[in-house]
């Protein structure tokens, strides 16, 4: 279970999030929804430990993440993150990108690529493949360590309808707690929980 | 690891070139200044356990010691031989400047003849192999307007001597208007060195006797050459490495995006730091090896350019090698570590956004 307690966050003097408290249940599929600039991505980054909040705290199974000494290792073991822009490293092949922080064997990386339908691109570089293929590779990288929690920030933001549906179908099938930030209203309906944000506040 | 270096290939190339240039120039400046000191020191050490110079004179070139003092010193118990030397320099025919060594005949044996014979009378000289190759008419030479007959050509491993002229000390006395620059005293028993030095110092209050090693350690000219060489080499090294540090910072700045992604995926700050350090060490070692080869090549060429008469002779010894390797690694690691450490303290998302900006 993830708990956010009184999260407030500033960029400079501007408050992006205002006193947000919420709970995300284990195994749920949660959607963070809101217009562009509502603070979805910032909240997702804070929930996933990629960003320290200016105020408030994040708890994983009642443990305050500020007290976790090796937060990088904690993230590596428990959290997967799919960014809006794939964020693959340009000078590494897809397989190398997937295995970059993996504790698994290479064969498992190849099996994951197979599952995502991009096995044949394993040795290609990110700029040699399409946007949809890159996003699938980014999902593979997030899944390789079999995380308990998967965060996805606008994972279909740069994809066409067909690819968007495929990505959401894949996320729903996962045996993990999934938290997706999106402004795509078509994807909201099938979620367990919807968290609506407006101007950095919960609606 | 090498992928990232190849990906940023232009910056990598610039770093390697800057490091190679900085290390090469430091190698050359230090090796050449050490070479000058070593050549002169070796010349003095040859058959000289004690050196006797004029008191209160900083340089052997300006020293004037009475040659007849050598006869009294030669009578001391434990003394094997005393040689008088006048050190000077001048134009020799078409050669603008060369070392001129006026020596007592008992020192001729230190010069290994490659052809001809040793001088037997006044106005006869022998010349080094290097200068022999430069002279138009090696049969006779003109020194300060006087003509000398060349009786032989010698070889010396000391560049200053191999590119110079050896004349009878009596001829040198007339040319340089002094009795002797210094006396070199060779001992039968080195244990008696301090006793004999005391005796010489008491014999004539106008001279000062020192063991050759003590003289070399305290000789002002050597200190000046070493210090000025060291200062120039350090400045050159520092300037080169400042360029590397700024290039390194730029390269790490370019990679904040990559570091942010790695941190987001759970790769530890320490592992990222170690990757950067490993890349820097590989680049520095490669540049160092390249610089060493270039410096050795340049030193070889300089030593064999006829025009330089063998005077430019340098050696990269183990101490210089180790000091420079340590200095290069330290500078490069510090140059990369500071921006990498700063980057590692920032949240992954901030790094990614900064890198994308």
Image (spheres, coloured by chain):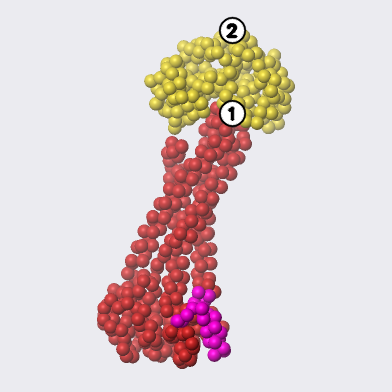
The image quarter containing residue B92 is bottom left
Q: Residue at left 55%, top 27%?
A: B265
* Residue located 52% across and 11% down the image: A173
- Between circles 2 and 1, the one closer to the viewer is 1
| Chain B painted colour | red
Q: What is the residue that sits farthest to the top in this orientation?
A: A189
Q: Quadrant of the C terminus of chain B?
A: top right
In this orientation, does residue B178 appear? Answer: no
Residue B111 screen position, x and y as percent:
34, 78
Q: In front here: A168 or B162?
A: B162
Measured from the top left, where is residue A4 in percent x and y? 69, 20
Where does the image place residue A128, in percent across and percent down from the top left?
40, 26
Could you say whether the residue bearing mark 1 is in a helix, strand or loop?
helix
Q: Is residue A7 left or right of residue A111?
A: right
- Rendering coords of residue B203 (x, y %): 54, 90
Q: Please, is residue B249 above or below residue A54 in the view?
A: below
Magenta stretch: dominant secondary structure: helix
Queried whether the magenta region covers residue A89, the answer comes back as no
Q: Which mark is residue A73?
A: 1
Q: In the rendered structure, does residue B188 fall within the stretch colored magenta?
A: yes
How many discs mark residues in the rendered view?
2
The numbered dot on residue A189 is: 2
Circles 2, 1 touching at the beta carbon (< 8 Å): no
Chain label for disc 1: A
Chain A display color = yellow
Q: Is residue B183 left or right of residue B341?
A: left
Using a 10 Å C-alpha cutoff, classify the residue at mark 2 as few (fewer than 14 neighbours), some (14 to 19) or many (20 or more).
few
- The residue shown at (57%, 24%) is A77
Real-space CA distance between mark 2 and mark 1, rounded to the nearest whole angstrom: 34 Å
Give, as a single range, the part of the protein colored magenta. Answer: B186-215
């Amino acid at each position: 279970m993830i708990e956010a307690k009184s999260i407030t966050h500033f960029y400079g003097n501007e408050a992006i999030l205002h006193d947000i408290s919420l709970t995300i249940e284990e195994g749920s599929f949660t959607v963070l929804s809101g217009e562009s600039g509502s603070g979805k991505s910032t909240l997702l980054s804070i929930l996933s430990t990629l960003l320290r909040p200016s105020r408030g705290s994040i708890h994983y199974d009642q443990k305050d993440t500020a007290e976790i000494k090796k937060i990088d290792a904690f993230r590596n073991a428990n959290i997967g993150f799919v960014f809006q822009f794939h964020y693959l490293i340009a000078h590494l092949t897809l397989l190398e990108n997937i295995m970059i922080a993996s504790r698994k064997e290479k064969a498992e990386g190849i099996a994951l690529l197979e599952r995502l339908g991009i096995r044949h691109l394993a040795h290609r570089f990110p700029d040699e493949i399409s946007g949809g293929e890159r996003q699938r590779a980014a999902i593979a990288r997030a899944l390789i360590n079999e995380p308990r929690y998967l965060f996805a920030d606008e994972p279909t933001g740069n994809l066409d309808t067909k690819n968007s549906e495929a990505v959401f179908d894949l996320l729903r099938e996962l045996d993990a707690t999934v938290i997706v930030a999106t402004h795509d209203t078509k994807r909201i309906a099938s979620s367990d929980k919807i968290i609506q944000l407006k101007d950095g506040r919960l609606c | 690891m090498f992928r990232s270096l190849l990906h940023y290939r232009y910056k990598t190339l610039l770093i390697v070139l800057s490091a190679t240039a900085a290390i090469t120039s430091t190698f050359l400046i230090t090796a050449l200044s050490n070479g000058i000191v070593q050549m002169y020191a070796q010349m003095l050490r040859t058959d000289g356990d004690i050196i006797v110079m004029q008191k209160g004179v900083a340089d052997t070139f300006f020293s004037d010691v009475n040659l007849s003092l050598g006869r009294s010193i030669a009578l001391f118990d434990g003394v094997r031989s005393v040689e008088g030397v006048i050190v000077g320099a001048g134009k020799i025919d078409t050669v603008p400047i060369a070392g001129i060594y006026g020596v007592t005949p008992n020192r001729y044996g230190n010069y290994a003849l490659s052809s001809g014979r040793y001088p037997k009378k006044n106005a006869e000289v022998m010349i080094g192999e290097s200068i022999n190759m430069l002279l138009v008419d090696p049969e006779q030479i003109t020194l300060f307007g006087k003509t000398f007959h060349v009786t032989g050509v010698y070889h010396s491993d000391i560049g200053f001597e191999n590119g110079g002229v050896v004349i009878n000390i009596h001829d040198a006395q007339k040319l340089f208007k002094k009795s002797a620059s210094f006396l070199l005293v060779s001992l039968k028993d080195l244990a008696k060195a301090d006793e004999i030095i005391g005796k010489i110092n008491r014999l004539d209050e106008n001279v000062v006797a020192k063991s050759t090693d003590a003289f070399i350690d305290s000789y002002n000219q050597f200190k000046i050459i070493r210090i000025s060489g060291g200062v120039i080499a350090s400045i050159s090294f520092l300037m080169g490495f400042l360029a590397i540090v700024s290039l390194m910072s730029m390269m790490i700045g370019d990679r904040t995006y990559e570091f942010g992604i790695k941190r987001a995926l759970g790769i530890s700050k320490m592992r990222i730091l170690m990757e950067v350090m490993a890349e820097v060490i590989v680049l520095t070692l490669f540049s160092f090896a390249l610089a060493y080869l270039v410096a050795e090549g340049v030193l070889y060429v300089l030593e064999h350019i006829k025009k330089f008469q063998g005077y430019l002779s340098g050696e990269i010894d183990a101490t210089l090698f180790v000091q420079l390797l340590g200095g290069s690694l330290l500078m490069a690691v510090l140059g990369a570590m500071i921006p990498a450490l700063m980057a590692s303290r920032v949240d992954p998302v901030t790094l990614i956004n900064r890198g994308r900006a």
